[in-house]
Amino acid sequence: MAGTAAFDPITFEVVRHALTEATEEMAVALRRSAYSTNIKTRADFSCAFFDRDLNVVAQAFCQAVHLGSLVHLVPIAVRAYGPENMGPGDAVLCNDPYLGGVHLNDISLISPVYCDGELFGYVANMAHHVDVGGGAPASVGAFREVYQEGIIIPPVKLVAHGEIVEDVFRLILGQIRSKRETAGDFRAQMAANATGARRLAELTEQTGIDTVNQYIKELMTYAERRTRAEIAKLPQGEFSAEGYVDNDGYTDEPVRLVAKIRIDDDGVLFDLNGSDPQRRAPVNSTFAQTFSACAYNLKTLMDPDIPPNQGFYQMVRIDAPEGTVVNCKPPAPVVGGWETHARLNEVIFKALAPALPERTPAGGKAMQCHAGFGGIDPRNGEYYCFLETLAGGYGARHQSDGPDAVQTHGQNTENAPIEETERYYPVRILRYELVDDSDGPGKYRGGLGLRRDYVFLDHEVTFTVLADRDKAGPWGLFGGEPGRQAYYIHQHEGKMEVLSSKTTIDVQPGEMIRYETCGGGGHGPPWQRDPAKVLSDVRQGKVSLERARAAYGVVIDPELMAVDSSATTQLRAAMQRQGSQDDNGETGAAQ
């Protein structure tokens, strides 16, 4: 390589992993410094490093939904603010959804990294704040315009020369309910960037900035080369599917998503033409969210060792028409864009299932499933906000059941423990358990959903459900059946009221909100499931005796808790005959 040192594979690996570890240490600093449960416990954030040309070099993935979000936002935000206006010790804040961002809760902090007076690159993190103002606590309410959803922050300097710009900080906090937690989380983001900048400076001091820059270029070339090789292994052709977000939050009209994936010598193209026009409702995805979904799907089809840097991302080609739910324009609301993003993930997998049957799962939770609430804490008189996203059933796979009660695909948020939630917030969690019989039957069954009951004993709260899957459960594959749909319930005045999956209500003292999330879809005909596995599920309380018989054709003696082999064989033969009549002997890809 002319003008540079000879390539050394050992140095390459050292630099590669040192860059990644710098972002991983950023993540540790952010998590340990944060105040809110959503960040410090549930890890709803991600960190990244960009070179001086704003190419992403390394990422720490606490949340895979950010696999592309930061990549899209950071270059646009920095160029809009002006790199020449960002000096050592500065940091720029941004959450503008129409300047490369996502929904308003996800706020990014971007800091330049200078080494020996020379711009080396940028560190950035994106974290989901529990409140950013707007019309409902936790800022996840279903509204008609983005301006109702919370404070919109264009690129503004929050830190100058290592010190907080107090006027800007006060202005932002003035729009937000949970001021103490939010202020602490912002400072945690600052600590993360300071940590990343420090580690990168140490790397350049030890190795030399020119050498590190050389290997950064090599790293991106390496990722592109390996990505091209992985794409070449995929079956060529055009594969299509469609799916629906159950409703938009204002009407019962489903939101149509269409994905056509073309794999050819030029790579992979995600064509989303045919998806619905954007709605005056909270289901619109920004381009960054859609890009993130497509990047995630492509990454799952490749060797996981391929570094997710610019070399990989430049291979993600998307045709997402502007003005649609997959690439909305202002002033469309975007708070539920992640719900649409999650469903798009599964539509893409559904399209690829016939071509890659051993690598694509059946339908799963495919929603963020937000639970957001807030009010005046009677213990201290402060306004508090709480937000979490609940897990659900994962879709069954080619040779394994779907896991029970997990976050699916791009989500990787952790559980909010009952003990911590009740300690820091004025709420009681009465029940937290699996939902039996919520699985999608199949040779391999879908995972079970979960139930979580919230009760507010001594104060009024405003509660928002921002979720989906209340009209239809996740689809099965290759003869597998759908998982059970989700339910959102308000218990008050001695009655149980089923809520829409996108609604904000006032909850009085003593009333309860219940979530029962959906189960995952099954894979393969249910009558092919090993009876021993069905018996195990019954013994564990995951599947009832009645469902074992009706859905799987397995007859179990309730006293002996053993399979009646003869009765099972006869029942399954009848089920198989009926199934053959229903589909003329064929098992399709997606139900």
Image (spheres, rainbow, N blue to C red):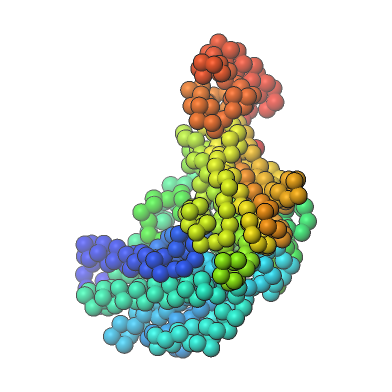
**Image quarter in which the C terminus is found:** top right
Task: Name the one closer to the observer, 180 or 240.
Answer: 180
User: Residue 555, relative to residue 84: is it above or below?
Assistant: above
User: Residue 197, relative to residue 60: is it above or below?
Assistant: below
Report which quarter residue 207 is drawn in: bottom left
Task: Name the one closer to the observer, 261 or 205.
Answer: 205
Query: Residue placed at 56% from the left, 70% from the top?
Result: 380
User: Residue 471, relative to residue 556: is it above or below?
Assistant: below
Does residue 376 appear to the left or right of 493 in the view shown? left
**Image quarter in which the N terminus is found:** bottom left
Task: Name the one closer to the observer, 254 or 145.
Answer: 145
Query: Residue placed at 37% from the left, 68% from the top?
Result: 29
Query: Residue placed at 39% from the left, 75% from the top?
Result: 191
Task: Name the one closer to the observer, 389 or 570.
Answer: 389
* Residue 328 shows in the view: no
Q: Percent from the top left, x then y, of residue 259?
A: 62, 52
Does residue 484 appear to the left or right of 130 in the view shown? right
What is the residue that sits farthest to the top in this orientation?
A: 566
In this rendering, the count of numbered labels is 0
Q: Percent from the top left, x then y, of residue 548?
A: 59, 25
Query: Residue placed at 69% from the left, 43% from the top?
Result: 472
Does residue 179 appear to the left or right of 193 in the view shown? right
Q: Percent from the top left, x then y, of residue 508?
A: 70, 58
* Residue 223 shows in the view: yes
Q: Percent from the top left, x then y, of residue 450?
A: 57, 44
